[in-house]
Amino acid sequence: MTTPAIAYLRTSSATNVDGDSQHRQREAIRRFAKGAGYAIEAEYYDAAVSGADPIEARPGFSQMLASIEGNGVRLVLVEDASRLARSVLVSELAILVLKQRGVRILTASGEDLTETDDPARVLMRQVAAAFAQYEKTRLVGKLKIARDRIAAAQGGKRIEGRHGYDRTNPALVKEAKRLARKPPRTGKARSLREIAAELAAAGFATAQGRAFSPSQVKRLVAY
């Protein structure tokens, strides 16, 4: 019986997008998966994304997280650690985010990035956890300020959805509707979870700092 897995690929520049980087990564991951008894059920790819870019700014990584929350897959495969990130802090934060969801990250050489006895990396992971909590608190504060500003502009009246998120934000509604349209290049509509992930990557989230639920996205699109 094979174990389901997700492949994550990243290229750092437009030149690499047109080159063989993604094909090399895909082939290395597939070879490893075949030999280890893993079945790749989905692939997520961040094209022209720097290895130092934060994970919340990566559409592919955000879509992968949204998928993981609903499909039960708990294994992510990458060609090597640098494909996840080149910045140690970003790498450890990405590992932390996946580990908190019960997900393991393996490289095509079999290295388990999720587990380590290296005290320096353990410390970095703790720093990353503290940083993640700080960013969450900061985001909640920014969202509250934005809601209060809109409420003041409307004479103190605030229109909310059933779950309390603010649908009077025109930028949020506009972006949700844009993402709901079928891309001309692929003609394939995004799922509600994928839209939620991309909204989160663009900085749109609930008052609790979480990505919108599919039902919330559906109401945003219909607003």
Image (cartoon, helix red, strand yellow):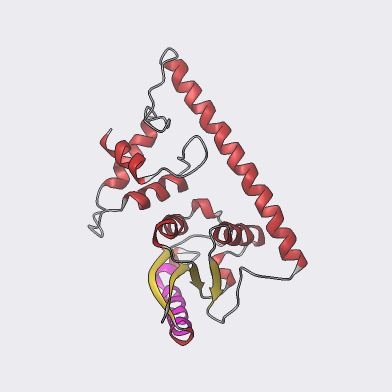
| Residue, far top | 155
Magenta run includes residue 211: no
Residue sitting farthest toward the front: 1
Residue closer to the observer: 99 or 59: 99
Span shown in magenta: 16-33
Magenta span: predominant SS is helix
Residue at left offset 35%, top offset 46%: 214
Residue closest to the eye, 202 or 17? 202
Q: Quadrant of the N terminus?
A: bottom left
Residue drawn at x 42%, y 50% is 197
- Does the segment drawn in magenta span residue 26? yes
Q: Residue at x 43, y 85 (%)?
A: 34
Residue found farthest to the bottom: 35
Please state the horizontal and vertical placement of residue 31, each as a whole percent of the image. 45, 85
Tell me if residue 176 comes above or below residue 106 in the rendering. above
x and y percentages locating residue 5 in the rendered image: 44, 72
- In the image, residue 196 above or below residue 165: below
> Percent from the top left, x then y, of residue 118?
74, 70
Quadrant of the image occupied by residue 3: bottom left
Q: Residue at x 25, y 58 (%)?
A: 185
Quadrant where the C terminus sits is top left
Q: Is residue 199 left or right of residue 125?
A: left
